Amino acid sequence: MATPTLEKSGKAPEPEAGFADSPYITATFRIRRFNPEVSEEAQWQDFQISIDPKERVLDALHKIKWELDGTLTFRRSCAHGICGSDAMRINGKNRLACKTLIKDLSPEKPITVEAIKGLTVLKDLVVDMDPFFQAYRDVMPFLITKGNEPTRERLQSSEDRERFDDTTKCILCAACTSSCPVFWNDGQYFGPAAIVNAHRFIFDSRDEGGEQRLEILNDRDGVWRCRTTFNCTDACPRGIEVTKAIQEVKRALITRRF
């Protein structure tokens, strides 16, 4: 894709009298626009809006879409940091738009918003998530057991649960995977999110499919591609120690202890 150019700005209406006494500020959002039906080139477009700095980037995107440009395209659902659908690059960092407050972004300067990297951009801030979810499916992210169906609950101690508790927090937002330089350069790499979700079951004491998952991740596109840059850990909006989980999977492959 060619280097983006700067498009003519969209600007909100002038504020009403008394605005100076309100908590609102005028913020500029510089959004990387891409519409394959119009042009093969991406463009940066500026939008000026009046908004409370305590609101979120997602609120700003809604305001732009509803009041200035209805063609702006992005994903969102729950708006509370649980669904993970509104992951995007904000001021050069992967974040959830619904968890990022405008006041934390130095709003006196233009706030840049663009699609996450490493996945094909379909339109504006929307990327093709199919490769990401295929890697997730490939690691078999479900409980595998043998024998007959149990007649009672599978019990687990709090200590056993603690072993994999951190990786149960993943919301599949792709912020970690799309922050990984290896994934940017080679989309065949499983990526941090898939490995995190494999970790969640490999270290589950009730699961019996750990060996299968380890063999899958022992592939040339598995855990050995990780270069331990910690980008994934920094990008995770749920605070998961992603790099630590990847290292634990590597260790399990070497020792066969998990």
Image: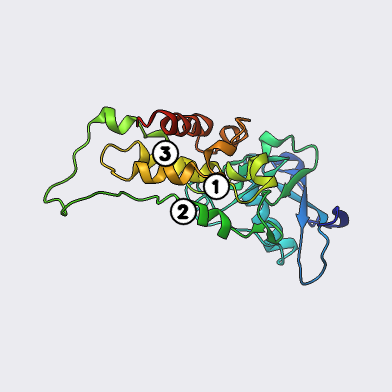
**In this rendering, position of residue 255 left or right of residue 105:** left
The quadrant of the image that shows the N terminus is: bottom right
Q: Residues within 10 Å of mark 3 (few under 14, many from 20)?
A: many
The residue shown at (25%, 41%) is 206
Give the Cα distance between marks 1 and 3: 13 Å
Q: Which mark is residue 39?
A: none
The residue shown at (41%, 31%) is 252
Element at label 2 = helix
Q: Residues within 10 Å of mark 2 (few under 14, many from 20)?
A: some
Amino acid bearing label 3:
His
User: Percent from the top left, x then y, of residue 108?
Assistant: 79, 37
Give the labeled residue for mark 3: 199
The extreme bottom residue here reads: 37
Evaluate if marks 2 and 1 touch, with contact meaning CB atoms under 8 Å apart.
Answer: yes
Amino acid bearing label 1:
Phe
Mark 1 or mark 3: whose residue is earlier in sequence: 1
Q: Foreground: 62 or 211?
A: 211
Give the labeled residue for mark 1: 190
Q: Foreground: 247 or 62?
A: 247
Q: Residues within 10 Å of mark 1 (few under 14, many from 20)?
A: many
Q: Foreground: 47 or 42?
A: 42
The residue shown at (59%, 36%) is 226
Give the labeled residue for mark 2: 138
Element at label 3 = helix
The quadrant of the image that shows the C terminus is: top left
Name above or below for residue 39 compared with residue 31. below
Amino acid bearing label 2:
Asp
